[in-house]
Amino acid sequence: MDTSGDLRVSDAEREPVIQRLQDAYAEGRLDEDEFDMRVQLAITARTRRDLGAVTHDLAPEPAPGRKVALPGDPPTGEDRMLAAAAHAVAVPTLFVGPLVLMLLSGKRSEYVRRQAAEAVNFQVTLLLLTIVTFGVGGVVYAVAWVLSAVAAVFALSGRTYRYPWILRLVR
């Protein structure tokens, strides 16, 4: 008979459970009331069985050290924030900011890499347009700010945004 569920839990065992709840809340899988209730239950849990009941219907915890999202997995809250940042940081930095995010965070998340690559392609297209038209294309940057904001909102919601009429040099 397995009695490990009857073992008492420590604060160190509660912390990862609370972190999983925070991740689920950030991903929209829990509403605020349910999140608050589950955190309270995790804090007051006495046994492993009580603690397991708090997260029983959430996705299983990833193996230790494994933070890479699988293809087809919905983007995490952190992924969505980084993807939105890739679009937003392009406004002041042109293609440099999104390129840095693509190189650093794109290894961990395919969603972030795709969104950052899209921002890089958009900014490179605008830069080439400005160069080819001897600066006249710079007027298009006003539209670029609006499109970057729209792309950031799409990324925050976990949806993919593709800029219209751009050269896709980076994949």
Image (spheres, grey):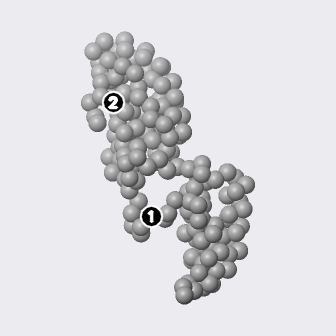
Residue 105 x/y as whole percent: 38, 49
Residue identifier under label 1: 62
Location of the N terminus by quadrant is bottom right
Residue drawn 51% across and 34% down? Answer: 154
Amino acid marked by disc 1: Pro
Residue drawn 58% across and 68% down? Answer: 17
Disc assigned to residue 29: none
Residue 62 sits in quarter: bottom left
Q: Is residue 48 above or below residue 25?
A: below
The tag earlier along the polypeptide, 1 or 2, is 1
Residue drawn 52% across and 30% down? Answer: 149
Camera sees residue 83: yes
Q: Is residue 29 above or below residue 37?
A: above
Residue 10 sits in quarter: bottom right
Residue at the limit of the structure toward the front, as seen here: 1
> Are there few (<14), some (14-19), or many (20+) residues within 10 Å of tag 2?
many
Residue 139 x/y as whole percent: 43, 15
Q: Would residue 15 be found to the left or right of residue 110 on screen?
A: right
Q: Is residue 110 above or below residue 168?
A: below
Q: Secondary structure at mark 1?
A: loop
Viewer-nearest of discs 1 and 2: 1
| Residue at mark 1 to residue at mark 2: CA–CA distance | 33 Å
Residue 131 x/y as whole percent: 29, 18
Q: Secondary structure at mark 2?
A: helix
Camera sees residue 10: no
Residue drawn 41% across and 59% down? Answer: 67
Q: Nearer the viewer, residue 133 or 55?
A: 55
Q: Nearer the viewer, residue 70 or 92?
A: 70
Q: Would residue 101 be found to the left or right of residue 45 on screen?
A: left
Location of the C terminus by quadrant is top left
Amino acid marked by disc 2: Asn
Residue identifier under label 2: 121
